[in-house]
């Protein structure tokens, strides 16, 4: 995500994102696992109507779901008249769950964040739930999600018919006083970096009502003590308010880790749907903010169930999680379409260690010089390249446990 001038002649910069295949349509499929491995049996494109396919492109600024990112083609240019432009039908689809009772699939999205109700036979979106103030809307506070850190996991608790999900990382809305690790005095820090919890979503499709809960994040488990380095992946329901959640990020040593957490929603968990991001600020300051006190909130309970890295997991991001049977989980990785963005010098050599998110391109797609930032130098070029060998393959892992997953419990 480089920074990019929005349009020729404009001033200022905006975040941006490459779309090498702007005609891409998010789809869902059926995978069969057998002697031939994991085989895709069918694929259904997601549609807004019988004639309008969903897109992966960014949503324009000012509309619900905008990530404030300018869509760039593979030459790092923005062209409003091309296929690589903003789309009202943009989706960043993440998790999927089949609802047999309703004959639909539910899909979570990072842009909105949205929850999509989709006809399983046609792929047509029957309803898109988004944050707002309407009776059926998701809580408006979810509009404060970080760009690309929206609604990640989603699961269906069959007995209640309710959906549970979460926002991938802490919300992004202002700052609060916080003593960062190693400091002796509080400084004004962003809640996206240091808030002590993620927002957990419980949505009832029957009543179209939503509750939010606080999923605690332990800052000591993450690089620089930043909870913003935490990224929740997917989840599955085990029934009776119990779930398995992927929790991952970079640890204090800077290395990526991936864990499965056992999570319980207590019967007395505090519904924080009507609490603003003053709650995130209170979690940092240790005191009430505008009458909202994190100390009064009953949090979700969690404990580590399984360390994926100890089992040989190598990919940076574990994302797809499903229950195969009462003892077995299926897990997939995010392959990022097998691509990554790199910076190359005039000789064509990749500038190792360069971070494209620190760079800026002009309206013609040319890199401009950013003083003191590796690789962000005029004359260098930004390119979409082959992804890392540990990330490119899309794999399905099966994990069989010694007892029913529902029999695991969080210690008292």
Image (cartoon, helix red, strand yellow):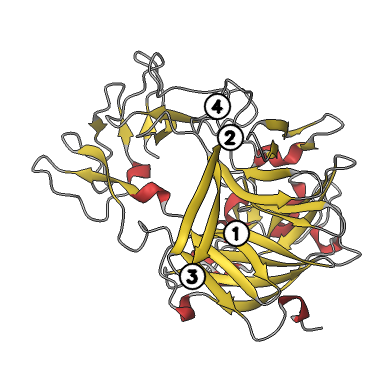
Residue 311 visible, this orientation = yes
Q: Position of residue 336 (x, y in %)?
A: 41, 49
Whether the residues at callouts 4 and 2 have beta carbons within 8 Å, the answer is: yes
Number of numbered callouts drawn: 4
For disc 2, the neighbor class at 10 Å (few under 14, some 14 to 19, many from 20) is many
Residue 409 visible, this orientation = no
> Which residue carries the number 3 mark?
257
> Which residue carries the number 1 mark?
232
Q: Position of residue 143 (x, y in %)?
A: 68, 37
Q: Is residue 333 left or right of residue 195?
A: left
Mark toward the start of the polypeptide (2 vs 3): 2
Q: Quadrant of the N terminus?
A: top left
Give the residue furthest to the front.
Answer: 35
> Which residue carries the number 2 mark?
46
Q: For numbered disc 2, what is the local secondary structure? A: loop
Q: CA distance from mark 1 to mark 4?
A: 28 Å
Q: For numbered disc 1, what is the local secondary structure? A: strand
Q: Give the foreground label among 4 and 3.
A: 4
Q: Position of residue 396 (x, y in %)?
A: 48, 64
């Amino acid at each position: 995500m480089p920074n990019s001038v929005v349009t020729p002649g404009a001033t200022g910069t905006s975040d941006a994102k490459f779309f090498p295949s702007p005609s891409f349509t998010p789809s869902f499929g059926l995978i069969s696992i057998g002697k031939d491995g994991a085989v895709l049996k069918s694929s259904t494109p997601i549609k807004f109507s019988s004639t309008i396919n969903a897109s992966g492109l960014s949503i324009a600024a000012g509309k619900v779901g905008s990530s404030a990112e300018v869509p760039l083609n593979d030459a790092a240019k923005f062209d409003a008249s091309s296929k690589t432009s903003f789309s009202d039908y943009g989706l960043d689809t993440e998790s999927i769950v089949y609802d047999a009772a309703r004959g639909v699939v539910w899909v979570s999205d990072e842009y909105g964040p949205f929850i999509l109700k989709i006809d399983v036979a046609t792929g047509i979106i029957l309803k898109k739930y988004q944050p707002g103030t309407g009776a059926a809307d998701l809580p408006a506070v979810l509009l404060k999600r970080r760009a690309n850190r929206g609604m990640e996991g989603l699961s269906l608790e069959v007995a209640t018919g309710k959906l549970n999900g979460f926002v991938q990382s802490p919300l992004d809305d202002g700052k609060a006083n916080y003593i960062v690790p190693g400091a002796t005095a509080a400084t004004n820090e962003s809640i996206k970096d240091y808030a002590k919890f993620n927002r957990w979503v419980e949505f009832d499709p029957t009543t179209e009502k939503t509750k939010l809960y606080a999923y605690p994040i332990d800052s000591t488990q993450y690089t620089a003590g930043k909870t913003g380095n935490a990224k929740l992946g997917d989840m599955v329901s085990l029934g009776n308010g119990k779930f398995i959640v992927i929790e991952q990020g970079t640890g204090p040593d800077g290395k990526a880790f991936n864990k499965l957490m056992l999570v319980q929603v207590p019967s007395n968990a505090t519904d924080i749907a009507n609490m603003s991001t003053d709650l995130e600020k209170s979690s940092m300051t240790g005191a009430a903010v505008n009458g909202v006190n994190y100390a009064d909130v009953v949090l979700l309970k969690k404990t580590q169930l399984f360390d994926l890295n100890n089992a040989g997991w190598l990919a940076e991001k574990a994302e797809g999680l499903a229950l195969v049977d009462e003892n077995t989980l299926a897990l997939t990785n995010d392959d990022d379409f097998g691509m990554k963005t790199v910076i190359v010098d005039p000789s064509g050599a990749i500038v190792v260690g360069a971070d494209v998110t620190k760079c800026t391109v002009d309206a013609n797609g040319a890199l401009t010089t950013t003083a003191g930032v590796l690789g962000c130098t005029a004359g260098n070029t930004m390119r979409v390249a082959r992804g890392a060998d540990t990330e490119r393959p899309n794999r399905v892992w099966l994990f069989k446990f010694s007892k029913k997953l529902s029999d695991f419990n969080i210690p008292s």
